[in-house]
Amino acid sequence: MNKRSRRKVLIIAVLFGVSVATVLGLTAFEENLLYFYSPAQVKAGEAPDNHSFRIGGLVVDGSVKRAPDSLQVEFDVTDNTEIVTVQYTGILPDLFREGQGIVAMGNMQADGKFIAQEVLAKHDENYMPPEVAAALKTAEDAAKNKAGQL
Amino acid sequence: MIPELGHFALIIAFAIAIVQSVVPLIGAAKNDAALISIARPAALVQFLFIGLAYAALTHAFIVHDFSVLYVSQHSNMVQPLMYRISGVWGSHEGSLLLWTLILSIWTIAVAVYSRNLPEILMARVLAVMAMISTGFLAFMLFTSNPFERIFPAPLDGNELNPLLQDPGLAIHPPMLYMGYVGFSVAFAFAVAALLGGKLDATWARWSRPWTTIAWSFLTLGIALGSWWAYNELGWGGWWFWDPVENASFMPWLVGTALIHSLASTEKRGVFKSWTVLLAILAFSLSLLGTFIVRSGVLVSVHAFATDPARGVFILAFLVIVVGGSLALYAWRSATVVSYGRFLWFSRESALLLNNIIFLTAAAAVFVGTMYPLVVDAFGIGKISVGRPYFDTMFSLVAIPLLLLIGIGPVVRWKGDNWSRIARVSAIIFITSLVLGLLLPFLIEEKLNVSTGLGLAGALWVALTTFKDLFIRLSQKVRLPLSYIGMIMAHFGVAIFVAGVTVTMTYSEEKDLRMVPGSSYNISGYDFRFQGVRKVQGANYTADEAVIEIWRDNERSGELLPQKRVYSGKGNPMTDASIDKTLFRDLYAALGEELESGAWSMRVYYKPLIRWIWLGCLFMTAGGVLAVSDRRYRQTVKQKFNLKNSVASST
């Protein structure tokens, strides 16, 4: 190979490498995009059945139930219109409380329970996860519209 | 009174910054020595006033002046002195002030240590740095004044976020900012060179040590952040691909590309315009990082809407800095000629490949971090990018990168041949591959390719680095410090990769429900839960669990994880307890009290996790060594000699 064709090979190799990385990257990106759904959207069937997503809302007062002999815990989250039951096994974050806004990541089960792999509550009692705040706002607006129509 | 003085000092500093960014540039354009000579004293005075403002805010924290809004939000009567001092940079306004202070320190450092620079270039560099300072001071004065008063003053303040009350985090932001802001020097040099139209190898030599030292600070800062997250967040992880972390990682990736590219430019005069572009990019990402972390955009893009002044200012500032410098680049870079010639297989090509890899990685992080923000800003939906994306991308990038670290340093400048390199590296390549794959096989008695490749990569880097060092040592020539620095940093990569690989594969993590008296065995260590007691700290009360560690029927240690409640807001916080050794960590975090005296508990066994930070320390030390090289001081001496000879000849 002369110099010029060698350089071409090098450039092609680099371009090839970068494009492989891009394709793999975009695939991985696509697969790992997590969408957020409010309980109302979940009940309306908008959330995917076979893909992880995030759900968020307020933890319903009095809904936290612990299994007696394991770390399994169940609680309801709501956007003040619909309620979804979340099941989680493990240690809840420090600021997990009834009435607090939380976000959970996981899958929907056939029985309508959300199995969470991760539960997040941010480190400030005034703090509302932005997704939850938006979901509550949407629900509130919808309720207002309904009231207006009546 | 003192807060007003601080505020006033900021206003004066702002005025000086404007003068410092305009006058020396006019002087440089007109070649007017009087105007040029304003740059240095202006930088000094600006530093004094910013320092005064900073001292005033610190004073307000120390004496509990809750009439200052910022102090009342982030401090209270019981907060220990150390966290009152670090409280200054605990939130948006104060961290901007720290940023500006550090910028003025870097400016002074350039003014003092680069006396050998041509005056005209120095004037331009200091002017560019003053422009950045002007932007930050304006941002503070018009939208985020740390000295704002509150009336009536509360009797006691809120408190510093308990999460931030940790020695690791107290020094993490200053280190990080030293790195971020340090890239402003490389940026200023690049812009100054573009303005002057003179971009040569000396330019690279001047900006190289500054870039390397900034990079060292950034490396240390990121490592400290990771160390803090591990100790304080109670999740036992060391990196979460959180947007806040990514914001500091992007400038690091581009900065790493930059220090390698500067090597080519300094030694061989190649890739000049590319290096300039990287310098602009590294600093732009530093700015972006500062803003997305501190402006509240991450909490919600709509924070922009609730506080439009800040948002608009940030966007405008970013557009001016990034857009302005890129426009200047587009206009001037055509005049830059790289004269060096090199063959396709050469050190130059290897360094170019390094740059491509690092930029690919930075692009991957950028997409994963910014895409959700953009989607949210346009109201398309709320999404986040899961960590497997980042993990996949980085394992992909790691393979060619590790291969390259082994080969790059031994390839000759200008050109080399494949067969020579293949000959000298083949044995190490095979050895590390076999050993790497064999090690996990010995541990788990089955083939584990990904772990094997990780270990092989670490071995390959370590062995090739050592071999090169050994050969150079046997040649009995004095090794330059910059070379030793490189060896050290590359060896740090090997340690880091080994740590990451082993921790990711062989960690054991368990969430448990434990009653006092029960025990749990994890990787040969018996965690015996004795019970929970109440503990009183300086500004918190805590439940503290006592866990004894037993191994081979011998008591080998004790873990005391706490669940703290701070007196301010009454938020509970987990304080993990870790038994640390070089080869493994045992980690326990206390959950909450369950029925019948049981507690939820999180226990981890983390082998080699310490190597992750140890590797970063090696990289940092490597950077510091490289900067200490005589080469960077020689020009000073030469000039000195010149002066002497002039003096003696007259």
Image: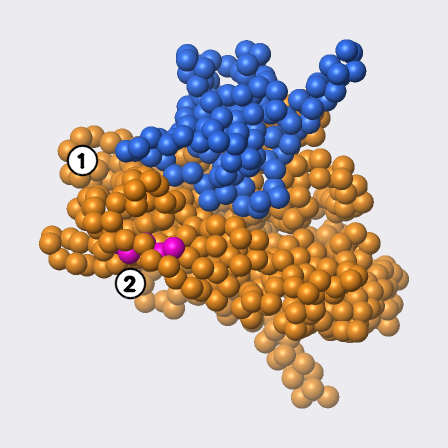
Question: Which residue sits at x=36%, y=35%?
Answer: A90
Residue B54 or residue A30, whichever sits in front: B54
- Residue B546: % across, % down: 28, 56
The chief SS type of the magenta part is strand
Instruction: Say which label, 1 or 2, has the lower sequence index.
Output: 1
Nearer-the-camera pick, A57 or B471:
A57
Magenta region includes residue B545: yes
Q: Is residue B277 visible?
A: no
Q: Which residue carries the number 2 mark? A: B474
Left or right, residue B84 beside residue A76: right
Identify the image quadrant of the C terminus of chain B.
bottom right
**Cα gap from disc 1 to disc 2, whole angstroms:** 40 Å
In the image, residue B313 sits, relative to residue A109, either above or below, namely: below
Q: How many marks?
A: 2
Residue A16 is left or right of residue B510, and the answer is right
What amino acid type is highlighted by mark number 1?
A: Glu
Instruction: Kindly identify the amino acid type of the residue bearing the numbered disc 2.
Output: Ser
From which residue to which does the magenta span run? B543-547
Observer able to see residue B367: yes
- The chain letter corresponding to blue is A
